[in-house]
Each structure stands twice: as structure tokens, then as C-alpha cells.
Amino acid sequence: MPTARLTIDPHFAIGPINRRLFGSFVEHLGRCVYDGLYEPGHPTADAEGFRQDVIDLVKELGVSAIRYPGGNFVSGFRWEDSVGPKEDRPRRLDLAWHSTETNEVGLHEFASWLDKVGSELMLAVNLGTRGTLEALDLLEYSNISGGTALSDQRIANGATDAFGVKMWCLGNEMDGPWQLGHRSADDYGKIASQTAKALRQVDPSLELVVCGSSSAHMPTFGEWERVVLTHTYDDVDYISCHAYYEEKNGDLDSFLASAVDMDHFIESVVATADHVKAVKGSSKTIDISFDEWNVWYIDRYHGVDKIEGVDNWPVAPRLLEDAYSVADAVVFGNLMISLLKHADRVTSASLAQLVNVIAPIMTEPGGIAWKQTTYFPFAITSRLAQGRALELKLDAPTYSTEVYGEVPLVDAVATHDDETGRSAVFLVNRSQTEAITVTVDIGGLGGVAILETHTLADDDLTAVNTLQDPERVGVHANDSAAIDGRELVITLPPVSWTAISLG
Ligand code: AHR
């Protein structure tokens, strides 16, 4: 059996773990909102029409900030449509997803839902088909306590207290030709800088995210970041990264190494941001908001799901409802490891998305809500990864992949919380054939015991949770874990994700 070794020492910190790393994303897309988190008439629906079973699952998932309302949707969105009496709200064409937006759920309803799930609102403004003035209007409506036209309108619409939104995204994926209002880096950099300055004139404490690339594989990647940050460096706090991974051409070995690509993506954006910092002679550091990440079988959308037709604009169609397998969940858990490994610079991240649409939570109208395989690594990592992320010394055998060359069979990260004295280790085994025994030197932690172990693995890597079989895949305790002196030894099954809590 192959073996790997790693050493944990709480003195070697990467950086503090910002809770915003465990954020998510709700877009007006498919059944994420309608027939997802909102379904009046469902047996568990509350007085506002929100499904209590979904609220409970979101709370258990441990989601911090939630990005809203898009995504591609936001680039055609008029925020004014989504406030005021519901019966007066217009139905609009949503060009991004070829659907009808009823505006039944809008800013007030979503803010109320966020209170129920205990998450923070992160708002995206439309810089595709709109501009600085509309962004300013939304800020006034949302954050000014009262005494102006728009803040008084919010109060009249039922929200006496301002929403107090701290984090704002300056548009969405403006580098993508599919985006309504797609621009060159130069044009976007100018409007983003102008809008950021205006928003900051209202409230200098706002945290602003400028759009980076929608994938590290865009032809403009790298140069886009350089040009956009050259325009906006002094005006923003974060640059965004978006990345989706899928198994292509049956190449599971490469898919299992997707986090190698995420590592590289993050490190490239950090290098570019720091280059602009050096050129400007700035003392300020720009962080990353990885505000869309997941496994997504995107080709399936283009091939099967895509809606077309001038007279065909359905309400809440079933779109992007990927069912996640065991292998998908292992890759997903590894992407979370990658985010934690870069906790010094990735200080916000949003799992895209939350309900029904490439989501960890699925619902059936009138029926049950259930956890996808990806739910488990997210919920466990969000709960156990506390304090700060630790630099690891990892020695692992490698394997060869078509896409990424030679990569380690094991990837891992550890965390340590000074307040509780607890540590956690998160690991993946990427081998399709071999279990791997990992020896962890925990001498630096002092005398600790194993508090919890969770492993996600299955003989059938394609197994999924479905409406018919919602609990087919889950996590189980890893009974191989044992501490002997200053060493923890654990066996990781082939294609598996594992979390260990020590204290
Ligand atoms: O999350 C689905 C879509 O992916 C988002 O709307 C868009 O920003 C990205 O391309």
C-alpha cells in the first residue's frame, strides 16, 4: 500500500480563516429561488412562502455570506422591479437563462430569508446593461437609514432598518462574451473604478469586489486582471475568481486533480495583483473573492438544458440540476482544501450555487429536500476548519495525469484554533486503485486525541443521492485512524475525502 507523510505544526500558519470562505451563491436561475428555497404551498412553507426544510439544511451546511441575485442574471436585472407590492412587480424576460422572472422574490424577501438562515447578504450590481447611477440608487435604497427618496421608499416597503450590505460585487463575469454588456478589460476597468469611487463616496467602509476572469482558461486571463486592477487598484478590496470543473472525455485521473488547477489559478491572480501593487508602489494588498466555484457539467447545459424560442420563456425551469457523484464530492472536497491552502489571500468564496442549481441541496415541489454528495464536505469543512490554516510539509507519491502532468496522490490542509485548542486535517486520496496510509506528525500539537473522523468513499464512484434514494451516499467514521505517540496514522480509501478533528 502506498504511504504518505505530513507534519502539522501550529506555528506555521498560512493565515487566519475568514468565515466568508464558507459563502455561497443564490441566483435567479432555474429552480434555485422559485420551487427551491421559496415554495408557498409546500407543507413546510412558512408564512412568507420559504421552505423550512431548506432553511434547516442551509443552516446545517454552515453558509456565511450569500452572493445575490446573480450571476449572469444580474447583467439584465433592474433591481427596482424586485421591491414594492408584489402584485405591482413586473414580469420580465431573463435573457441570461431564457426564462421569465416574476420578481415574486426580491430584495426584501431575500433579506428576510437570510435572517432565517443566519447568513450575510453580498450584493452584485448590474454593470452589464446599467451603470453607476443605478448602483448608487441600490446602495441608497439598501443602506441609508432614512430621510431620502429611496431609503424612505424602502421603509414604506416594510424594512424600517437598512439592510446594511457590506460586500458589493461590481458586475459579473464582464470578461465573458456571453455576458450582457460584456466589455474589454479597459472599458470595464473604467466603469468599475468610477462606480467603486461613487459607492465609496456614500460609504468608504464598503468592501468592493471587481470582476476578475470567469475562468483561468479564458483567452484574456492574466491580462484581464492586470488591466482591470491597473484601473481599480485603489478603489476595490477584492478581485474575483470563478472556476468550474467537470470530468471530460472519461479522464477521471485528471478530473481528480482539479484542485491543482485551482491552486495555480489562485497563485496566478495573486502574482498579477501583486505585480500591479509593485508598479503602483502601493502598500495595499488586494485579496481574492473566489465567488463562483464548484463541479459543473457545463457541456450538459449547452447540449440538453438550453432553452430557446422567441415565445418560450418558462418560469423556474429545471436548469443546471446536476446530480453529484462520489467522485464529484471528492473533487469538491479537494477544492475546499485548495481554498484553505490559500486562506491568506482568498478571504471570501462562494459555492455556486445553493439550491437545485449545481447545488448541494435539492428539492422536489411538494416533496422532500435532500443532501447531494457535495453537501457533506462543505458542511464538515465549514464546521471544523476554525482559526487559521496551517502550512503542511507533505510527502506523497505522485501519479501521472493527461491534463496536469505528474501530481501528488494525496492533497491535504490542516487548521488550528487557538481558542479551543482544536485542530483539523482535511485530506483526499486521488488514486483510483490504491488505499493510501498517511502518517501525520502531530507532535507540534502537544497531547491530542481524535475527536471525529469522516470519510466519503464508495465502491461505486458514480453513486448519487436522488429523490428516489436520497441517502444513498454519505460520510462514515474512519475507524483506521489511531494515534501512536506523536503520530496519527490513517488509511484513505481509493478516491476519498476525509476530515479529522483533533483536540
Ligand atoms: O453559476 C452559473 C453561472 O456561471 C453564473 O450565472 C455565471 O456567473 C457563471 O458563468
Image (cartoon, rainbow, N blue to C red):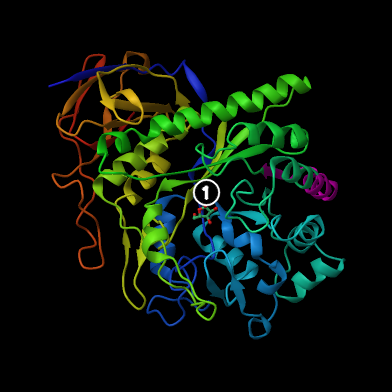
> With 337 as the anchor, is 101 left or right in this view?
right
Q: Position of residue 211 (x, y in %)?
A: 64, 44
| Residue 423 seen anywhere in this rendered image of the structure | yes
**Residue 202 forms part of the magenta stretch:** yes
Q: Residues within 10 Å of mark 1 (few under 14, many from 20)?
A: many
Q: Mark 1 near ligand 1 (CB under 8 Å)?
A: no
What residue type is disc 1 on? Ser
Q: Position of residue 330 (x, y in %)?
A: 29, 40
> With 478 as the anchor, is 446 left or right in this view?
right
Q: In the displayed structure, would residue 38 be above or below residue 488?
A: below
Closer to the camera in the image, 249 or 378: 249
**Residue 193 forms part of the magenta stretch:** no
Q: In the displayed structure, would residue 100 be above or below residue 419?
A: below
Q: Quadrant of the C terminus?
A: top left
Q: Quadrant of the N terminus?
A: top left
Q: Position of residue 266 (x, y in %)?
A: 52, 31
Closer to the camera in the image, 74 or 56: 74
> With 292 as the anchor, is 368 left or right in this view?
left
Q: Which residues, given as a range, are shown in magenta?
A: 194-209
Give me the residue at 68% from left, 54% from top. Answer: 165
| Residue 417 seen anywhere in this rendered image of the structure | no
Give me the residue at 68% from left, 27% from top. Answer: 285
Q: Quadrant of residue 159?
A: bottom right
Give me the residue at 32% from left, 38% from top. Answer: 255
Q: Secondary structure at mark 1?
A: loop
